[in-house]
Image (tube, rainbow, N blue to C red):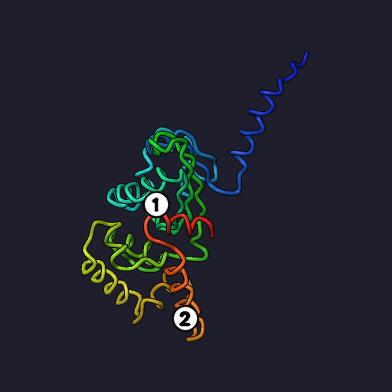
Amino acid sequence: MTTMKTPAQVHADDLDLTFELAGVGLCIARERVIERCNALFGEMFGYRAEELAGGSMARLYPSRDEFEHTGLRAAPVLAADRRYSDERIMRRQDGTLFWCQVSGRAQRRDRPYACAVWTFADISAQRPVERSLTGREREVAQLLVTGKSSKEIGRALGLSPRTVDGHRARLLQKFDVTSRVALIAQLLGWSGLGARAQSDIQSAASEIRSLAGSGVERAQYFQSL
C-alpha cells in the first residue's frame, strides 16, 4: 500500500529538487562553513557536493588572505542590506583559478555570516584568468573592474592609495597595456577593443562613479544592475 505524502512533504521534496537542479551553484553556509551545496556547486570547484559539506569555504579561494579580506569587505554590506554580490577569482581543486560571479543573502543583519545562502556562477568562458597574478594583484583587479578609485580600493583593502597605484602599475605591465581603461577591458575579457569601444568604457565608468556613492551605496548600486 502506497503512503500518500503530506502537502508539507511534497513541498519539502520540491524545494530539494529546486536546490539540486538550479542552473547555478548553490551553497548554504554557517559562519562561512559549507552546510550544504548542490552538485553544480561542487562540480564548479572540482569536488563532489558531499566532499565540501562541513568544510570551510576558505579552500575555494586562491589564498587564506583573500578569503579573509573578502569576508571583511562583504560583512558590512550584508549587515546593512542582507545582500552582497561581486565578481571574484576563485580556485578549483586542481589549483586552476577562474572568475566567478557571486551573490549572497544573509538571514540576519546582526550576524551576517550566521546563516547565508550563496549562488556561484562560473564566468571563466567570458573572462579567463590569463595572467599569473599575486594575491594582492587579484584583489586590486577585482575592485578595479567595479570602477573604484585607488583611494576606495585602498580603503577596502587596508592599503595606501600609493600602494594600490603600485599594484595597478604592475598589472598594466603584466597585461601589456598603458591605460586604466585598457586594463579593465583586459580584466573583463574584452580584448582587441578599438578606440571607440574604449571611449564607451571610459564614459560608462564615469557614469558609474557619478551615479553610485561610496561604500554601501555603491555596492547596492551594482547589485541593482
Q: Position of residue 142 (x, y in %)?
A: 38, 62
In the rendered structure, the answer to whether residue 210 lies left or right of residue 66 reads right
Foreground pick, 127 / 87: 87
Q: Position of residue 133 (x, y in %)?
A: 31, 65
Q: Quadrant of the C terminus?
A: bottom right
Q: Quadrant of the N terminus?
A: top right
Name the kind of residue labelled 1 in the image. Asp
Seen from this angle, which residue lies furthest right? 1
Q: Earlier in the sequence, mark 1 or mark 2?
A: 1
What residue did someone put label 2 on? Answer: 198
Dividing the picture into quadrants, the one containing residue 96 is bottom left
Which SS class for mark 1? loop
The residue positioned 38% from the left and 48% from the top of the image is 74
In the rendered structure, the answer to whether residue 170 lies left or right of residue 195 reads left
Dot 1 alpha-carbon crowd within 10 angstroms: few under 14, some 14 to 19, many 20 or more:
few
Name the kind of residue labelled 2 in the image. Gln
Dividing the picture into quadrants, the one containing residue 79 is top left
The residue positioned 56% from the left and 48% from the top of the image is 24
What residue did someone put label 1 on? Answer: 94
Which SS class for mark 2? helix
In the rendered structure, the answer to whether residue 142 lies left or right of residue 41 reads left
